[in-house]
Image (cartoon, rainbow, N blue to C red):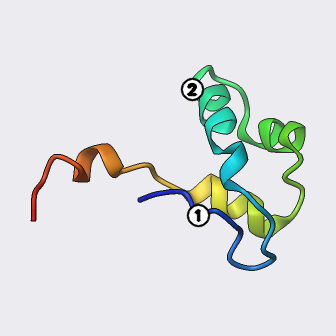
Amino acid sequence: MLIPVRCFTCGKPVSAVWEKYKERIERGEQPGKVLDDLGMDRYCCRSLLLTHRDVIKKIGKFRV
């Protein structure tokens, strides 16, 4: 749903790089290189960003 503020494993802040990461991926850059440039060098943080799916727009149209 929403990107976590911090990595679940190590506690490093990851939400600050999400928008930059998403923009660069949409432009066609390689995910590994983008993560390297943004300073995400730990495996736990990288996997958090690589596996996240932004579904808030799909879910937001439904009411409870």
Residue 10: image quadrant is bottom right
**Above or below: residue 14 compared with residue 6:** above
**Percent of width and height locating residue 31:** 72, 40
Residue at 87% across, 64% down: 42
Residues at discs 2 and 1 in contact (Cβ within 8 Å): no
Side (left or right) of 51 relative to 15: left
Q: Residue furthest top?
A: 27
Element under disc 1: loop
Residue nearest the observer in this picture, 19 or 44: 19
Q: Which quadrant, please, contains the C terminus?
A: bottom left
Q: Which badge, 2 or 1, comes first in the chain's sequence?
A: 1
| Helix, strand or loop status at disc 2 | helix
Q: Quadrant of residue 7?
A: bottom right
Q: Which quarter of the rendered picture does the N terminus lie within?
A: bottom left
| Residue designated by label 2 | 26
Badge 2: how crowded within 10 Å, few (<14), some, or many (20+)?
Answer: few
Q: Report the residue at 88% width, 36% height from top.
A: 37
Where is residue 6 shown, x and y percent of the image?
69, 67
Where residue 34 appears, as percent x and y from the top left, is 79, 36
* Percent position of residue 54, x then y: 43, 49
Residue 25: mark = none
Mark carried by residue 4:
1
Does 61 appear above or below 49? above
Q: CA distance from mark 2 to mark 1?
A: 20 Å
Q: Position of 31 compared to 28: left or right?
A: right
Count neighbours of disc 1 (C-alpha within 10 A) and say few if under 14, some if 14 to 19, many if 20 or more: some
* Three-letter amino acid code of the residue under disc 2: Glu
Query: In this rendering, would 14 be left or right of 23?
Result: right
Q: Quadrant of residue 17?
A: top right
Q: Which residue type carries mark 1?
A: Pro
